[in-house]
Image: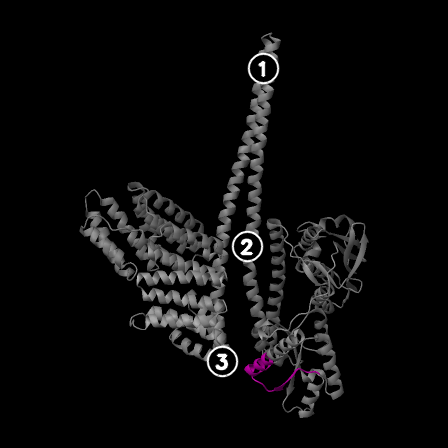
Amino acid sequence: MIDSKRIGSAAALAVLLVAGPVAAAGPVDARLDAAKAAMMGDPGAALTLSTQALALAKADAGPRRDQEIAAAQWLQGEALLRLDRPDEAAPVIAAGLAVAAAKAPDSKLHGDLVMTQAALEAARGQVQLALRDFQAAYRIFGKAGHPRGQAVALQNIGSIYQDAHDYEKVLHYYAQSAEAYPADQLLQLSAANNIGNALMDGEQYGRAVVEFERGRKIAHAMGSPQLEARITANQAIAEVHGGHPDAAWRLIGAADALLRPLPDARDARRSVMKATVQVELARGHPKAAAALLDPLFAGVDLKTTGPDYVDLHAAAYKTYKQLGQTELSLAHLEAFKRLDDQAQTLAASTNAALMAAQFDSANQASRIAALKAGQLERDVKLARARNLIAAVLLAAAALAVAALAAAVVGVRRGRNLARAANERLRQANQALAKAVRARTEFLAATSHEMRTPLNGILGMTEVVLAQPDLDPALRDRVAVVGAGARTMRALVDDILDLARLETDGVTLNRAAFDLPGLGREAARLWSDEAAAKGLALTCDFSQAPARIVEDPGRLRQILFALLSNAVKFTDRGTVSLSASVRQDPDGERLVLQVADTGPGVPPDKLAEVFEPFGQVDSSRTRTHGGAGLGLAICRRLADAMGGEIRLDSVVGRGTTATVELPLHRAGAAPPVAAPGRLGDCAVLFCDPNPLSRSVIAGVLRPKVRELTALAGLPDALDAAQGQRFDLALVEAAELGDAPEARLAALAALREALAPAPVAVLLPQAAEGLDGEAEAALLSAGAALVVRKPVTAAGLVEALGGLLETRAADERDARTVATV
């Protein structure tokens, strides 16, 4: 559904910018002018004035009676829309539109009523109708010679695409709006602010700052400190998101200075306060942010807030979480999730409606093309029949030469008609291809929008399952929901991948990477599921080169799909992943194989399983699930990389999937500099206590680039084999009780993670652990020992200080080496 508040705002702009003063100063005109003046500030008064104007117009017998009635009904409809009474507005707008279309077609008044009709359709969620009528209003204003009306219509069209998160079209229409009528400062200001907001939604913060700066200059030239302060606040938010909190703070100071002399600028001050909350939070001042949040949410029910509170809820959640006010933080998180889900639903429905309109248009074009092609074939047959009759009649004339000439002419005409028919058939095929592409794009867009709510379900189930005091029965039910959501997301991901491949083809991003590491990582992702089924999952890359040049993301996608099938369809035995090199006349070939001891694939199905939605049989689909897209995607990716994929299978004994690719070896990896900030680190955290692990993981996850939380030291050692970490944090209890065992475990972990530093969490008064234990850990290679209990802030500060110290030491070492 379209954001009616934004459309209504644009419609109000149409009232002020498109509607000019009505000629003559009679009683009807006086009330119409008064209604226009009251529309923005007091729509209730505007409704009363327009109703009075309608009664006077109906009693008037003058030549302008019909136009006065239509103008009064237009303003009535506008006022009812602004009062959120669309059902009452509908018949009034329809009556006025009928009069304007009949008595004053293609006039400014006609365009105003069509624009209001589109706003009504947008408020009701009728996206396709609203888009059609905004476009119609644009054309009518063009015929009437009113570029301001055209500019407002373009902004309304951009608002529809902004609700669909199609920011490229949003920027296109807002830019067109600014160009359509550059003389109007208020319209230019609106365009600059809307373009800035669209760029922020698209995460283009640098460009957004430029647009807001342009809006500030326009507001300053207009002499409107309130508008200038509002846009300055928006610019501060863009600077915060762009990573420039100091610049944002200077902008907040400028906005406060603009509003300080104005006693009645309540709404503008509230906008600046909202921006200040985000700036204070970015500057690391959660207490200052909380002090601003209290008056902003005073008397506000968090369960009923509207879309304009979504960013404020997000900031409140982060603020209260940092201050340790868990209950209040969760309340704002729930409010933010509610509004975010509403926004995603709005974007999904709007995008689907726009795609459906595009698909319907393409379908209609293809049907028309098919009908034309059929008619063309009939015309060709008729033409050939006519040529034959002409030839027979000419032959009967007993003039052989004339008959021959007629035959030649007939053959030429038939050949020309056949050529024309072929050309039109080719055009018809192109139209049909466009319809198929529109279908594929519609499928891709719908699948993409489904992922957002599924990710929300998965995120909330993980939050619920992380609560240690959760009722066991409820935990089981939530786990079932999470498992179902994960299955659904996998299906949606496959559909989205296939749609993207059909629409855009395969784009490869080749780079040098660690091949054995990628293989171990792919195998590790399926190790838990394999172990749960009692399968032995092995990974052998001993015969493979250490580093190659290829697209690691696409190669990981292929291995993930093949391992998924192998683990899914194998009930007992083994699953193995291996890599080797084969010499070929054209060069070296990399051979990747995934073998299993599953039920196998019948010979007559080996080709079918590589087709989209291909399955071995329906019963297996119902038992194991899946859409039958994995192997189809793998084949397309392998073909794009210049390789091939095949299956070798024996029913009852198992299947081996083989992928062969051209091998491009890479040199040794360059040394990687240690990060100097905690936020840039991939952190490995190991703690056997599930409650403590959950709490500390919750503290660290928002502070680091990536966090892997594991229960045991063996799991940590396995993870270190398949992934590079920048820092490790381990609970001392997991290293063992005996001093010798503890130091040996620490040494093994340091060797596996090198050159990443290892920090140890050491209980303050644990039995057998004293100051000598801390010294022993440090001497054994621990980079840092953190005594427990420790606050969240203290832990983050200690780890950050460790990284800063190591980065400084590394820079000093490089400086000395250079000298």
**SS under mark 3:** loop
Residue at which label 2 appears: 446
Which image quadrant: the N terminus? bottom left
**Which one is nearer the viewer's eye here, 677 or 492?**
677
Tell me how far mark 2 sits from mark 3, CA to CA. 40 Å
Give x and y (percent) for residue 679.
57, 73
**Which one is nearer the viewer's eye here, 233 or 651?**
233
Lower sequence index among marks 1 and 2: 1
- Identified by mark 1, the residue type is Ala
Residue 323, label in figure: 3
Residue lying at 37% horizontally and 56% vertically, measured from the top left:
188
Mark 2–mark 3 CB contact (< 8 Å): no
**SS under mark 1:** helix
In this rendering, the label closer to the viewer, 1 or 2 = 1
In the rendered image, is residue 814 in sight? Answer: yes
- Identified by mark 3, the residue type is Leu
Lower sequence index among marks 2 and 3: 3
Residue lying at 51% horizontally and 50% vertically, measured from the top left:
355
Magenta-drawn stretch contains 800: yes
Tell me how far mark 1 sits from mark 2, CA to CA. 60 Å
**Left or right of 645: which side holds 440?**
left
Magenta span of residues: 781-801
Magenta-drawn stretch contains 599: no
Lower sequence index among marks 3 and 1: 3
**SS under mark 2:** helix
Residue positioned most to the top: 398
Residue 406, label in figure: 1
